[in-house]
Image (tube, grey):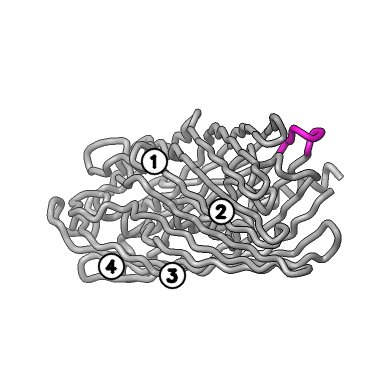
Amino acid sequence: MKKHLLIFFVVLLATIIHFQAWATNGTQAIGTGPISSSMGGTGITNPQSGISAIYLNPAAMTSFDKGTFDFGASFAVISVDGTASTSSGTSRYRAFPLPSIGVIKPLGNDMALGLGVVAVGGMGTDYRNTKLNSMRNLFIMQMDFIPAFAIKFAKMFSVGISFPFSFQVMDFGSSSGQAGADHAFGLGLKLGADVDLKMLSIGAYAKFTLLKPDHEVGFQTSVNTAAAYSSRMKLAPPTELGLGVSTSLLNKSLVLSLNGKYILWSSADGYGNSATFTTSPYGFNWKDQIVILFGVQYKISIVSIRAGYNYGSKVLNDATQSNLLGSFNVRAPATIQHHITFGVGFDVGKNLSLDLGMVYGIKGTYSGTLDASLLGGTQGVAVSSSASNSIIDIAFGLSGKF
């Protein structure tokens, strides 16, 4: 049995590394597993799946009176188009599977342990062999291994803690023999609280970075220069705050959830740094992001019908950029702000359900400038650039109790 589990996790890791995730709240997937994703990514309180509790708010794990397990996978189909000066191209990255798995084990009535392996997200494009070949390819992926613990007080108030251990892969697609790929490890801390008032529940969390993933990559600062500009780049998951309220009505047949997140991209290494030709470390110069999530679930007999909406404020700076940042915005266009979600679940046994979900990320666009030297022109001359992308994500999973 242990041998089979080891093989499973190795295959899972290989799958995540090989296929790129495309996330739409910055570099983060809007939800984990088909249930949370189909409810707009909600689950900070009153989670409807164990994996969303482990990932979003460990304190909410005490809401499950039995052990739970979740296995989910999603298949994302993306469309990304970019332009730089008079050249344009469509990214060759098109479809990616994103797996997740989680287990919660109650310890008596007031404590719970959880363990999750989650493809948190990522982003990227591949313009090679298109008219936008000078933009090459970009790849960022992060997987979290999450041990978690929660304890309940006075039958209504819970606190929880988790330590997301991150594995990152980053590839800036350097050419001319330059090494642009690297991997790194990081460690985070998430603290959560949850209050269960029977018909109403309230949850909150705060996430911090303890150990920043530290990458060493080579950047090609100009297509006219063959030598790489060596740089160390920390790509730290951002500090994040979350708050959620949820109510269960009609004998718990109807669930309504409203969540909010504040993601501090601007102060996160790698995401908040300005990207210039002459300074290191490089970064995307992203803005902080407000995310609003809403989800609804209505259960009729053995069928659960779900829907939701997810809005994320703009993270890209549209100001004129005569440096590397214009290139990053075309190669990593985190432009989608509005997501509509749907899903359905079927009870296939007393303690087992099959869940399906869909996320539609409405097309978002970016327009700005980049330095002409990135296209073979003169350094210091700004040329126009733009990018747009949309996404359709189909998710499925099995959830059970033991």
Label 3 crowd (10 A; few <14 / some 14-19 / many >=20): some
Which quadrant of the figure contains the N terminus?
top right
Nearest the camera: 399 or 386?
Answer: 399
Residue 382 picture quarter: bottom left
Nearest the camera: 167 or 278?
Answer: 167
Say whether disc 3 or disc 2 marks the residue closer to the N-terminus: 2
For the point 67% across and 64% down, the residue is 396
Closer to us: mark 3 or mark 2?
2
Span shown in magenta: 106-114
The amino acid beneath tag 4 is Thr
The answer to whether residue 289 is magenta is no
For the point 78% across and 69% down, the residue is 301
| Tag of residue 264 | 1
Residue 270 picture quarter: top left
Query: Which x, y percent locates residue 355?
Result: 70, 64
Label 1 crowd (10 A; few <14 / some 14-19 / many >=20): some
Marks 2 and 4, how far apart in space?
Answer: 35 Å
Residue 395 picture quarter: bottom right
Q: Which residue is mark 3?
A: 79
Marks 2 and 1, how far apart in space?
Answer: 19 Å
Q: Do callouts 2 and 1 mark residues in contact (Cβ within 8 Å)?
A: no
Label 2 crowd (10 A; few <14 / some 14-19 / many >=20): many
